[in-house]
């Protein structure tokens, strides 16, 4: 069993043909690394836009490259390369490769590794690890779209009855929406980003596109013209009027037979027709005919995903630290002293940690950090004064 003994950090553009061949060899031998986020092309493309982007070459006892870890540096913290946009992350290596996390942190001059969607083994000895499990949500199209839809309808009859009603209303009011599945143009990308930013503003979530580099990342990916890899977008247009109107669009990341639903967006004026749900199903029907067998909706998240998918593999969210911070110790103490409120405090803690992680990933300039933390503080105070009413998640 190979073990990590030495680390070398290089820029993504410094990967050699030998690195690329080794990387592709590792992913070809790991069924859990078939997704597009683990493709070396994804890493090389986004590395041109991500601030402080790096690849760690991981060497074993024989002095051979035994793996890679793409990452970005935020202060003394390591994050997945492309966070918060990159949904899955992990060590690119053969199964069984043992990572020495204290060595990893020391070599990369970091105190902390934080992650969401970690895929693969994680044995973190001699460090302070705090992880929770999340379940990836997958739509299995291996038997075709019709078989998939029949399975889902049998399990979620009421949901699909409502979907059918929405589809009939679309036909009645607009004569149906025109569908296309195409490459991502600058105009389509900007439309989706505009809708997402409006959504972030309404919900109080951090605007992940306000920092600039995240939009550049998607623009860079959109330039790649490979047949089996890269950005695609499913689109609904209302063509009942004199000019076509964009109703909904879902930006997807594709790698061969695997498609990841990434950024869904719809025009608020069409909300009552559930265009996001209808578009997701229409995309699946279309790509199944192209040979796609797996649609990845990500891990956890909105309730609607469970009616469209089945639980698949486990991935991890959490942190590995070389030493426990004072804040962590204090919060642990508060939770320990309040067993009755432990669950509520745990949820609050996780929510705050996720927001801070997103801000840390996006905002690399002092002003951006300051504005984001001030907005987070204002939102926290506002919610303490006026608790938000419970709402149901809806498809974007």
Image (cartoon, grey):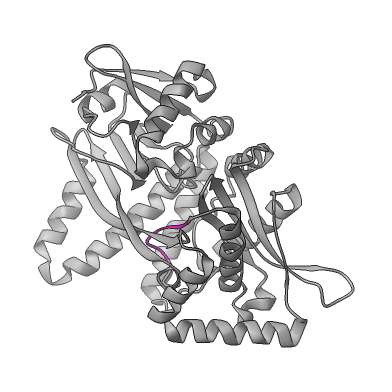
Residue toward you, 309 or 146: 146
Q: Nearer the viewer, residue 47 or 35?
A: 35
Quadrant hosting residue 56: top left
Q: Quadrant of residue 171?
A: bottom right
Residue 250: in sight, yes or no?
Answer: yes
Residue 206 placement (x, y as % from top left): 50, 56
In the image: residue 369, left or right of residue 223? left
Position of 161 compared to 381: left or right? right
Q: Name the residue rendered at 35%, 38% in the picture.
A: 30
Q: x, y percentage for residue 286? A: 62, 62
The structure residue drawn at horizontal position 23% and vertical position 18%, both measured from the top left corner, is 5
In the image, taking residue 356 as reference, residue 149 lies left or right, namely right
Question: Between residues 150 and 277, which one lies in front from this camera angle?
Answer: 150
Percent from the top left, x then y, of residue 172? 73, 88
Lateral position of residue 372 relative to residue 333, left or right: right
Q: Which residues are magenta?
A: 294-301
Percent x, y of residue 60: 25, 18
Question: Is 8 located above or below residue 300 in the figure?
Answer: above
The main secondary structure of the magenta stretch is strand
């Amino acid at each position: 069993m190979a073990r990590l003994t030495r680390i070398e950090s290089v820029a993504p553009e410094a990967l050699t043909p030998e690195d690329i061949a080794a990387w592709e060899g590792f992913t070809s031998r790991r069924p859990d690394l078939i997704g597009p986020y683990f493709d070396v092309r994804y890493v090389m493309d986004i590395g041109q836009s991500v601030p402080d982007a790096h690849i760690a070459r991981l060497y074993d006892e024989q002095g051979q490259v035994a793996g890679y870890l793409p990452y970005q540096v935020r202060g003394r913290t390591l994050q997945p390369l492309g966070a918060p946009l990159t949904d899955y992350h992990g060590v690119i290596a053969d199964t069984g490769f043992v990572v020495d996390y204290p060595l990893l942190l020391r070599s990369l001059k970091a105190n902390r590794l934080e992650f969401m969607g970690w895929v693969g083994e994680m044995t973190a000895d001699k460090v302070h690890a705090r992880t929770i499990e999340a379940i990836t949500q997958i739509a299995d199209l291996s038997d075709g779209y019709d078989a998939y839809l029949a399975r889902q309808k049998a399990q979620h009859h009421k949901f699909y009855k409502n979907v059918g009603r929405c589809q009939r209303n679309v036909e009645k009011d607009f004569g149906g929406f025109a569908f296309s599945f195409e490459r991502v143009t600058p105009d389509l990308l900007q439309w989706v980003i505009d809708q997402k930013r409006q959504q972030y503003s309404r919900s109080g979530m951090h605007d992940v596109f306000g920092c600039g580099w995240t939009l550049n990342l998607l623009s860079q990916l959109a330039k790649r013209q490979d047949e089996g890899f890269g950005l695609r977008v499913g689109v609904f247009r209302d063509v009942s009027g004199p000019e076509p109107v964009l109703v909904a669009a879902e930006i997807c990341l594709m790698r061969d037979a695997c498609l990841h639903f990434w950024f869904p967006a719809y025009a608020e004026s069409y909300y009552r027709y559930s265009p996001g749900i209808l578009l997701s199903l229409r995309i699946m029907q279309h790509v199944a005919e192209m040979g796609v067998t797996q649609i990845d909706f990500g891990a956890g998240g909105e309730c609607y995903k469970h009616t469209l998918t089945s639980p698949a593999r486990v991935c991890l969210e959490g942190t590995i630290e070389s030493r426990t911070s004072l804040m962590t110790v204090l919060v642990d103490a508060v939770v320990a002293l309040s067993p009755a409120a432990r669950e509520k405090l745990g949820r609050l803690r996780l929510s705050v940690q996720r927001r801070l992680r997103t801000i840390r990933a996006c905002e690399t300039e002092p002003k951006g950090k300051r504005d984001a933390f001030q907005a987070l503080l204002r939102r926290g105070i506002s919610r303490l004064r006026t608790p938000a009413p419970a709402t149901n998640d809806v498809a974007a």
